[in-house]
Every structure is written in structure tokens, then in C-alpha cells.
Image: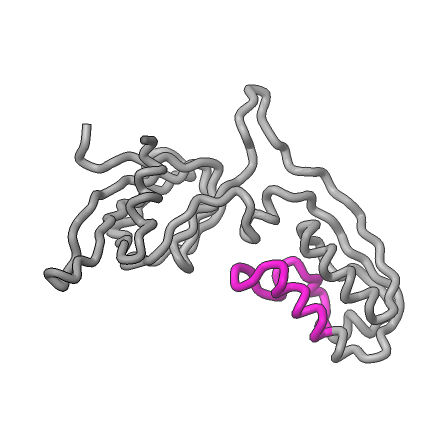
Amino acid sequence: MPKRAQLLEALAGENSIGILLMLQMDGVPETLQLVIATAEFDPQVNGLREKGNYVVRAIGVREHRVSAGQFGGVRFATDHPLLYQYNTTPVGLFFRGTPPDVNALLIDLIQGYTSTFGPWRQIPMFINVAQPLHTLLTGGGDLLGEMPLPLAENLTKALEKHQLETKIITGEPPLGADEHGRSQLMQALILDESYIVALDFSVELLGKA
């Protein structure tokens, strides 16, 4: 069984626990190395039974927010809100007009933002901050922000609900693969609220041949 699958299986049980023991820079630029211990709570001894230790190497790291310690779940994702800015087409979202109720529009924009990203991104990321948002929305029209397409689609619904005209200017789509056919799309490693966004991840069993 591939080591990545072994790691996922080791943490799939109801009583399984992961512990991030260490995070450090690797010798290769833009590379991080994590040491993860896996264990299972054994009610017979009222303690943890060790299952295995793994080294996860993140290659081509773009961003990370990681806290050492215990976590409950792990997954490798290729479709996740953290990846929208890397793996989807960037766009500029413009609007024209003045909303009848700017406060109601603000609420709908925040809801559209939250429904796109959940807890993973926060306003004002991707929003035009040249002026306060309230001022921007009552100015008759402007660039709302440069953002990933999924966010623009949700915010367009909010703008049009409040009788504003919208226009999306599409940028260059992300490069799917390099000249050798290797994927250039980002992946995410999610450990509860911790995460790493990188080009690829490798997993090895620590201390085993």
C-alpha cells in the first residue's frame, strides 16, 4: 500500500489520533518537512497505542499555517477553497450602479464570501481596499476586487440581487502542466485547522526501510 494511503488509513478510525511532532524547512527551497505520529486510543489501558510515524514532505510550498500538536483528521485535497486562488482563473469583478440598501448588500456580500471560502479566507482578501467598502459600494461603480472565479460568481449574485450591473474581466487561466507534463496545480494538506498549500506531497514511513 502506498505510504500516503497508509497514513490516511492510520488516521481514519474513530479513536485514531495524529500528533504533529515537528515542522521544519528542508534543504530544498520552498520545501517543508513534517513528522507525524499516529496513535489509537485504547480504552483497555486508558491510553494511546502507537501505530506509526511518518515524514511528510511538502514540495513547492506556496503558503502554510501549521500548529504542532494533536489533530484528529488529515486529508490531501486537490479541490478546496484554499486552492481557488491558485487553480482557478483569476478575474476582475466590476459593478455599476448604486444599491437601494447598501447595508443589506454588505451582508449579502459577506455571506457570499463566507459561502465560498468558509473559515479559510477572510475579507478583505481579494477585495478592493483603495477605499472603505461602504464608500466603494455607494460610489456608482468601480472594481470590487481581483479574485478567483468561484468568489466572483458568488459575489455577482449578491450584486445583481441589489440591482447592480456587473462585468467580469477574465485573466489568464492557471497552467495545468509544464512542458514535461507534470501538474502545476496546487494541492493542500489539511490537518484540522492547520494547512499547507504546495505543488506536491510525498509520504514516507519513519524508521522503516
| Depicted 82 relative to depicted 102: above or below | above
Q: Indicate the quadrant where residue 66 lies.
A: bottom left
- Taking the spot 27% from the left edge, 57% from the top edge, the residue there is 15
**Can you tell which quarter of the image residue 205 is in?**
top left
Is residue 19 placed above or below 107 in the rendered structure?
A: above
Give left or right: position of 157 versus 48: right
Q: Nearer the viewer, residue 44 or 203?
A: 44
The percent position of residue 200, horizontal first and vertical second, equals 45, 36
Q: Give the residue at x 24% y 51%.
A: 21
Q: Quadrant of the N terminus?
A: top left
Magenta residues (range): 106-133
Residue 151 x %, y %? 68, 56
Applied colour scheme? one colour
- The residue under the point 26% across, 50% down is 22
Eyeballing the image, is 49 above or below 160?
above
State which quadrant residue 132 falls in: bottom right
Residue 181 magenta: no
Q: How many marks?
A: 0
Residue 59, x across and y down, in percent: 42, 36
Side of 116 relative to 14 (left or right): right
Is residue 111 in the magenta section? yes
- Report the residue that reaches farthest toward the front: 44
Task: Where is residue 39? Give x, y as percent.
Answer: 22, 51
125 sits to left or right of 49: right
The quarter in which the C terminus is drawn is: top left
Q: Residue at x 59, y 44 (%)?
A: 86
Q: Residue furthest top?
A: 180
Identify whether 92 is placed above or below 8: below
On screen, residue 138 versus residue 18, left or right, reads: right
